[in-house]
Image (tube, rainbow, N blue to C red):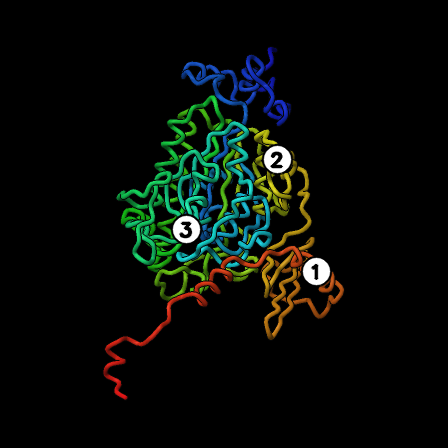
Amino acid sequence: MDKDPDNEIGPKKFTRRTMLATGGSLAAAQIAGRIGMRGLAATLASGTALAQSTKPNIVFIVADDLGWKDVGFHGSDIKTPNIDQLAEKGGRLEQFYAQPMCTPTRAALMTGRYPFRYGMQTAVIPQGGTYGLALDDYLLPEMLKEAGYATAASGKWHLGHADTAFWPRQRGFDSFYGALLGEIDHSTHKSANGNADWYRNNEAIEEAGFDNILFATEAVRVINEHDQSKPLFLYLAFTSPHTPFQAPKEYLDRNSHIADESRRAYAAMISVMDDGIGRVVEALETRGMRENTLILFHSDNGGVVDAFFAGESDVKGKLPADNGPYRQGKGTTYEGGTRVVGLINWPGKIEPGSADGMMHVVDMYPTLAALAGATPGKNKPLDGMDMWPMLGEGKPSPRTEIVYNVEPMTAAVRQGDWKLVWKTTLPPKVELFDLSKDRSETTNLADQNPEMVKTLQARVIELASQMSPPLIMQDAVRLLLHSDTVLPDAAEMFNVGD
């Protein structure tokens, strides 16, 4: 019997090194191994054959404040069929960690370094913030661009807005479309102070439409116009389901089974994002790019369950996010704030199932660099690790430690299954959890395990010695010490008398 040409050159024999080094007729054979001779014939007929780069396209999708349980594949009442399909056919990252808040997570992704090393560890960049992601860091899009990638960003930036040097076009992206700040009205595209926050490249623009629909439309445009002789790095950063909880009527109607008004709007925002992801996948398939595209999806932090961390919008009542079994949410170093929804999908390269080893968002930088054939060197020393052996080869995670955060007054670190949460403000508080038995962090074992507490505290002190002061605190001091004198209203002064 003749060998099946679809199986003769299979993905198991198609290594990363050969993928990055091949061309010409060998590339054709390898493409056939990935998509089969019938798929190759269709690609040839479409005119996009072999002009495609053999380096993988990378579509990196980030949700904003998405609760761990608020996707279908985690058992939610919110339907997310497109996200679920990527999870079903790819790897579910069930111990994937981000930073407790938005700006720090995005900084960690772009640098491969923990934010405490460069002052981004505390809170987010506020509207009045003058700082941004350090200009001497060599960012992920810069590295990929140098490796031959076309780079595009659509969505939320939130890594610096006060100086154009911080903006995406100056940090490695060929194109940018979206918002620079952290929170906008989803329909008017205005920030909390009423100023418009909507850009194409370096130019402020006015445009009608629901922001997350527009972000996906831009991503589809980038894919449709992409020159496939180059690989593509597309960063799609939704503002769903961040406050304010708003959505078009058709999406609210789709979620009418949810009685609570806030959760219905929150769910509708997730539906908008899920539809957008479906449109992106469809565009990749239409262009014949899907088989050679790695799709990553995760939230920037856990869902917000405390109004203090909800942003500047007015929120009332119980917040709608659901972090499942994990304690608390956004803004905290407990699992609910840092263990987030995550998945990775690449047909023929990622086996379906759960990739259950520890992984942190800083690991994305070296992992993608290796897959892209990029040569790190301009970057500063990385905290991230190449996770492809776990993701693509089924090996255990090389990571044995998670640094949740290190700030002047609080820190959290995990080694193995032991996790320390240490608050040094008076009165101080030390918590120790065994996550193998207590993923909800309900039982503090610090008193029963003083040696483990001592070991993890020593690690925190070691890390703290490498810490840069939080930039937001420096900005706050500047504003307080150098702001104008505040006096009563002149009419009040006139009427008070001597």
Residue at x-position 25% and y-position 87%: 497
Residue 158: horizontal and vertical position, in percent? 44, 49
The circle drawn on residue 213 is none
Q: Residue at x 44, y 17 (%)?
A: 42
Marks 1 and 2 sit apart, C-alpha to C-alpha, by 31 Å
Q: Where 171 falls versus 348 (above or below)? A: below
Amino acid, disc 3: Ala
Across and down, in percent, residue 150 comes to: 46, 30
Task: Give the residue furthest to the right.
Answer: 451
Amino acid type of the residue tagged 1 in the rendering? Leu
Crowding at dot 1, Cα within 10 Å, few <14 / some 14-19 / many 20+, comes out as: many
- Say whether residue 252 is left or right of residue 374: left
Q: Nearer the viewer, residue 485 or 276?
A: 485
| Residue 35 coordinates in the image, percent (x, y) | 51, 22
Mark 3 and 2 residues: CB-CB less than 8 Å, in contact? no
Tag of residue 162:
3
The amino acid type of the residue labelled 2 equals Pro
- Calculate the distance from the C-alpha at mark 3 to the C-alpha at mark 1: 38 Å
> Is mark 3 in CB contact (under 8 Å) with mark 1?
no
**Vertical arrangement, residue 296 with respect to residue 231, above or below:** below
Residue 208 coordinates in the image, percent (x, y): 26, 44
Which residue corresponds to mark 2?
A: 376
Quarter of the image for the N terminus: give it.
top right
For disc 3, the neighbor class at 10 Å (few under 14, some 14 to 19, many from 20) is some
Q: Judge left or right: residue 6 versus residue 152.
A: right
